[in-house]
Amino acid sequence: MTSDTEFKAAVPTLSRRGLLAGAGCVAVMAVIGGAGRAFAGDGSLLRLPGAQDEQRFLATCLKCDKCRSVCPQNCVSLATVEEGLVVARTPKLDFHKGYCDFCDRCIEVCPTGALRPFSPDQEKLGVAVIDQEECIAWKQGGCVKCVEACPYQVVALNQNGRPVVDAQRCNGCGACEFACPSATFMSYSGSRRRGINVQKEA
């Protein structure tokens, strides 16, 4: 039969030094994880037509800004350092400023082929998603701006008069987000999101 003394000797003990070392390792791993996200970004940026392969795009984009300068709809913006050091100053889509009409000018002006040919009938920039907390029609009814703005008729009103998106057919052009008045109408909320927002597909 094992005595109490033998049992205690057999049980490993955790010293204060070991405890501190373990806590330090956990903290370091957390910092490394956070640093990795800060360095590379979270991968959620909406890219221009033909830039949906993020790794290929980052490897070939020169950050020359030509695509932004030729966009007639003014929907091309630049990623910031806060969105990741690697992606900083690369072009992204900002549908608060305009929407994409797939004119191909950005693709034509790209000197490296980072933006490849793109077919909006077969490919997507992203997909529009209704934010029921921000959408005027979902909160109080009456607004049909996104339905009227969609050039592809993929946003429609349901039986309750609220907008819904056909995600299978939506190519993410952003016309609905650009037209959405919720940010102005409900500016008191302080939210930068609109009642409908284009998001990168998972």
Image (cartoon, rainbow, N blue to C red):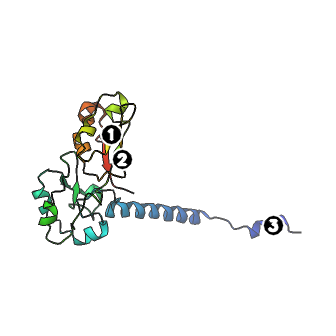
* Residue at the disc numbered 1: 156
10 Å crowding of disc 1: few (<14), some (14-19), many (20+): some
Tag 1, which secondary structure? Answer: strand
Callout in the foreground (3, 2): 2
Taking the spot 45% from the left edge, 60% from the top edge, the residue there is 30
* Residue at the disc numbered 2: 166
Q: How far apart are marks 1 and 2 (CA)?
A: 8 Å
Tag 3, which secondary structure? Answer: helix
Query: Residue 197's quadrant in the figure?
Result: top left
Check whether the beta carbons of the residues at disc 1 and disc 2 lie within 8 A of each other. yes
- Pointer 1 or 2: first along the chain: 1
Q: Which amino acid does label 3 sit on?
A: Thr
Query: Residue 196's quadrant in the figure?
Result: top left
- Pointer 3 or 2: first along the chain: 3
Mark sitting on residue 106? none
* Residue at the disc numbered 3: 5
Check whether the beta carbons of the residues at disc 1 and disc 3 lie within 8 A of each other. no
- Pointer 1 or 3: first along the chain: 3
Q: Which amino acid does label 1 sit on?
A: Ala
Tag 2, which secondary structure? Answer: loop
The number of discs equals: 3
- In percent of width and height, residue 18 lies at 58, 66
Vertical placement of 108 versus 191: above or below?
below
Quarter of the image with the N terminus in it:
bottom right
Query: Residue 146's quadrant in the figure?
Result: top left
Quarter of the image with the C terminus in it:
bottom left
Pick the residue in front: 166 or 32.
Answer: 166
Check whether the beta carbons of the residues at disc 3 and disc 2 lie within 8 A of each other. no
Q: Which amino acid does label 2 sit on?
A: Asp
Callout in the foreground (1, 3): 1
Taking the spot 22% from the left edge, 40% from the top edge, the residue there is 179
Vertical placement of 75 versus 158: above or below?
below
